[in-house]
Amino acid sequence: MTTSDDPRRHIPRTDALLTVPEIDDARIRLGDTVVRTAIRDGQDAARRGEIAPDDVQQAVIDDLGTRRTSSVRPVLNGTGVVVHTNLGRAPLSSAALEAVTAAAGYVDVELDLETGARSRRGAATRAALLAACPAAGDALMVNNGAAALVLATTALAAGRAVVISRGEMIEIGAGFRLTDLIASTGARLAEVGTTNRTHLRDYADALGADDVGAILKVHPSNFRVQGFTSEATLSELRELADAHDVPLIADIGSGLLQPDALLPDEPDATTTLTAGADLVIASGDKLLGGPQAGLLLGDAALVGRLSRHPLARAVRADKLALAAMEATLTGPPPPVRLYLHADPAALRARTDKLGAALGCEVIAHDGRVGGGGAPGVPLPGWAIRLPETLAAPLRLGDPAVLTRVHDGSCLLDLRCIPESDDQRVAEAVSAARGAAGVP
Ligand SMILES: *Cc1c(COP(=O)(O)O)cnc(C)c1O
């Protein structure tokens, strides 16, 4: 029971709090429901005696100041893994970010403003892809790499066979296997060769024995078979494909459009098309450094056939992704490229400076390409060594910092953190030390 001198009688009422300018403004940013929840939380805290009734208003304002419009939390990637699958793969460039913001409202994604008539969706992105990969006769962007593969196998081989080497039947992550994906389209898998060796005659035998819709060559991006190995080359397969009038598809995975000298074993779309593939399939958010996307590049008639297939509508790219892809291709090098090619000397100077400021040891540390790309290729660099107990408070801090826990240490690699964030990293480490009671 509350009496007239009970302080709880002085808890501010909801309608009064809603007239406070800072709280009213928050309704525009966060919505009414979130604001009323924050108010209720503040009032409840006062009812429980945790805060004074006079402090409720400020508590609500402070609470609203920390709430985000989505639960997605930005993370500073201190792992040294450039394409970090669990951190959303490629971070967008500032140019792509600006394009996404511009594309968020009503836009001319399917309208020619000149004539007022309907236009081809994503025409500018297509042009940017063709400019970046002139070896392709046409280009189509869809939702992701897996969608590109499903579209290609459905349109070219549903009810028929897809010939694939047993050495290329990969699982791409979290239990998803490319072969299951292909089988789900209604195409039959004609597996040829063995895990370590597949010869041209294995493909030829399958083409002679089955009704084949396509030959599929997959880059086994996330593992390597070493030793007694052999595979049929694209140019050998090209001749076979011509002889049987069957399309040759190459799933290269990573999305490099041109060769990258740093990653000599990583296939790129230009070389793959030049070597004889009719169609290249790749992801947009791996080494290309763009938004989530699947790219289909190659023979104009084939790409046209795919873009007219009903399934193309089900896997079509979102306008935000189309805009981000165009800006990634035409703008400055995206973060993935910069981080991959970070100058080791510059990285060392930065790491030494931060290490000295924090009183920490700096050790040699190899970064990784990640995202299932270039397994085993080290990216020489440096890391600040912290006690392992700091990993959790760094992860839970604001900003959240993800480090690499290795050999009883917490390693902080600056490769994938913009230099402009070094001060925030230093503050995050200080806060984590405070939270963990570590000097
Ligand atoms: C990553 C990858 C895929 C899947 O692409 P998503 O964009 O993740 O759907 C398919 N094939 C290969 C070879 C890959 O590396």
Image (cartoon, grey):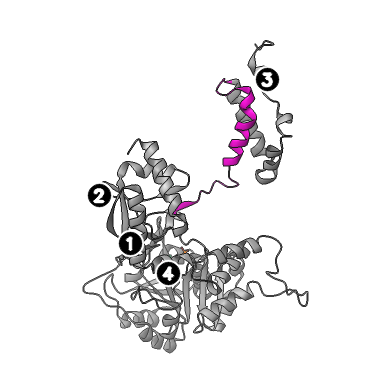
| Residue 113 left/right relative to 181 | right
Name the amino acid type tagged 3. Answer: His
- Ligand 1 near label 4 (Cβ, under 8 Å)? yes
- Is residue 204 depicted above or below 187 in this figure? below
Q: Foreground mark, 2 or 4?
A: 2
Q: Hey, what amino acid is under mark 1?
A: Arg
Left or right of 111? Residue 127 is left
Please determine whether, in this image, residue 13 is positioned above or below residue 261. Answer: above
Name the front one of labels 4 and 1: 1
Residue at which label 1 appears: 348
For marks 2 and 4, the one nearer the N-term is 4
Nearer-N-terminus badge (1/2): 1
Q: Indicate which disc, 3 or 2, sits on the residue closer to the N terminus.
A: 3
Mark 4, residue position: 254
Q: Quadrant of the N terminus?
A: top right
Rounded to the nearest whole Å, what is the CA distance between mark 4 and mark 1? 28 Å
- Count neighbours of disc 1 (C-alpha within 10 A) and say few if under 14, some if 14 to 19, many if 20 or more: some
Residue 71 in the magenta stretch? The answer is yes
